[in-house]
Amino acid sequence: MTINALFTAFCAELAEDVPAPLSQRFTLAALWHDLAALVGETPPPEVAALVDGPAPHPRPVGAAKWLARDRDPDTAA
């Protein structure tokens, strides 16, 4: 899969839950995790731990699920 095809698929997936995915900010761990899933690979344990573990900063990693949550003021952290 080419880089352009991968990012096209990634943006299409994000667009289902995230407005204007190209203008969103993501951690490298979240990007790695989601792109690995798109090509059927398992990310390294340290990447999965960052995405699935507690957030180290105000915007948690795990791009799509957290950005969708941030849009709802009743569930935002």
Image (tube, grey):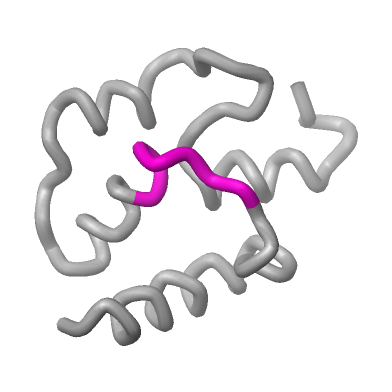
Quarter of the image containing the N terminus?
A: bottom left
Q: Residue shown at 34%/24% (left/top)?
A: 50
Measuring from the top left, give residue 56's x and y in whole percent. 51, 14
Start and end of the magenta stretch?
25-31
Q: How many marks?
A: 0
- Hey, which quadrant is residue 7 in on the image? bottom left
Q: Is residue 58 left or right of residue 73?
A: left
Q: Is residue 70 left or right of residue 13?
A: right
Residue 61 placement, left or right of 71: left
Nearer-the-camera pick, 3 or 9: 3
Q: Is residue 22 above or below residue 72?
A: below
In magenta segment, residue 35? no
Residue 30 part of the magenta segment: yes
From the viewer's perspective, is 13 left or right of 36? right
Q: Position of residue 52 (x, y in %)?
A: 36, 26
What residue lies at 31% left-to-right and 85% top-to-bottom?
5
Residue at (67%, 49%) from the top-left corner?
A: 68
- Give coordinates of residue 74: x percent, y percent: 87, 32
Can you tell which quarter of the image residue 77 is in?
Answer: top right
Please tell me whether residue 57 is drawn above or below residue 9 in the rendered image: above
